[in-house]
Amino acid sequence: MHALDQTPCRQVNFNQFYQSHELLVRAIVRQFKFKDAAADDLVQDIFIKAWRGLEHLDNHAALTGWLKVIARNECINEIKIQKKHRHLVSVECVIEEVNATPSHAIFEITFFQLEEHFLVLKDLIQNHKDPIRRQIACLFYMEQWSIKDICQHLQMKQNTVLSHLRRFRLIVTKAMHRWMAEHSSQLI
């Protein structure tokens, strides 16, 4: 038990608080494998958060345990943030990749894929079993009619037309995923 655990929390200054518990907090941060500047930043964040909440701590004897929980939770939150950022692709990487690919190659691949996707879409529309949904999809995707025009032409409510399009989009999405899986080796 630290000496500060017995001192009323409102009478502690930040420097005392920090010096008394720094080794404890750093040990917890090290357990989570944070190093160098990242560890220092995290220790600082933990102390700031704890300092701000110190006045709400009723049981002064629980200060060390309370600080351990804050440190652990902040480390876990930081790990979650880092994992989320790891999955994001930076814009710079995409730009470098695009710049490294000759522009005519990008156009040829994109045009080829677009043409193939359009043929798959056309085939899905023509072979769709539900005649109403087939007609709505054809008017929307092939003829490029607006939702309003489709509603008026077929004398349907807007929500009904949108519902048919949503269902058709689900079918198209699954078909496109299958098509891409089947043709992924050809695209590389």
Image (cartoon, rainbow, N blue to C red):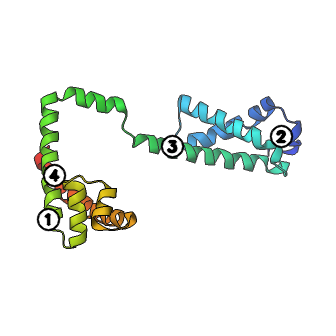
Left or right of residue 77, residue 128 in this image:
left
- With respect to residue 167, does 78 lie above or below? above
Q: Is residue 6 left or right of residue 17?
A: right
**Circle 2 or circle 1, nearest the eye:** 1
Residue occupying image coordinates x 54% and y 32%? 38
What residue does disc 4 label?
Answer: 118
C-alpha span from label 1 to label 3 = 46 Å
Image coords of residue 173 (percent x, y): 26, 59
Q: Residues within 10 Å of mark 3 (few under 14, many from 20)?
A: few
Q: Nearer the viewer, residue 62 or 188?
A: 188
Q: Where residue 185 sits: x, y (%)?
A: 13, 49
Question: Who's the residue at 39% across and 43% down the image?
Answer: 87
Q: Which mark is residue 126?
A: 1
Are the residues flagged by discs 4 and 3 in contact, CB closer than 8 Å?
A: no
In 3D space, how far apart are the residues under numbered discs 1 and 4 (Cα atoms)? 12 Å
Q: CA distance from mark 4 to mark 2?
A: 71 Å
Q: Identify the element where label 4 is drawn.
A: helix
